[in-house]
Image (cartoon, helix red, strand yellow):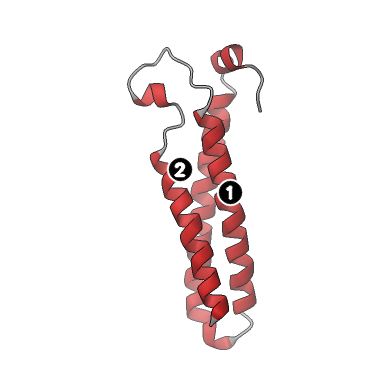
Amino acid sequence: MKTKIIAIIFLFISGCITLLSLISPINEYKEQGINSAVDCDSSFIIMTLNTTAILFIITAGLITLFLLQNKNNKKICLMFLLIIILFLGINTLRIFQAYQENKQPYNQEVCGEGL
């Protein structure tokens, strides 16, 4: 029972971080309609948020795999695994988008090599 609660807590935390990442723009200036401005900070913040979320998701996944050893937990574990796959996909996509924004020539010229 305690293990289920811990898995739920980790999934909740990773869900909150994922939501925060989704509502945060990769380039704040483009979000405001200023296409010529370069944002040096936002892509790094998005990558940091999503990497943290992925760590929580992996931990929840490991706990879920531990829960799968008990036959009574099959349905809830399958639900957890579907949520984990969804969160992993979203966070991986956001990291890829932020990395692409960071590697644009105009971004490297203004902000430096960075990542």
Determine crowd level at label 1: few under 14, some 14-19, many 20+ residues with C-alpha closer than 10 A.
Answer: some
Determine crowd level at label 2: few under 14, some 14-19, many 20+ residues with C-alpha closer than 10 A.
Answer: many
Amino acid of disc 2: Ser
At a point 52% along the width and 50% down the height, the residue shown is 89
Helix, strand, or loop for circle 2? helix
As drawn, is 28 to the left or to the right of 112?
A: left
Q: Position of residue 112 (x, y in %)?
A: 64, 16
Q: Which residue is mark 1?
A: 52
Residue 70, placed above or below residue 98? below
Q: Nearer the viewer, residue 55 or 97?
A: 55
At a point 58% along the width and 52% down the height, the residue shown is 54
At a point 41% along the width and 26% down the height, the residue shown is 28
Quadrant of the drawing holding the C terminus = top right
Q: Which mark is residue 21?
A: 2
C-alpha gap between disc 1 and disc 2: 11 Å
Q: Position of residue 3 (x, y in %)?
A: 57, 77
Amino acid of disc 1: Thr
Q: Position of residue 4 (x, y in %)?
A: 53, 76
Residue 109, placed above or below residue 82? above
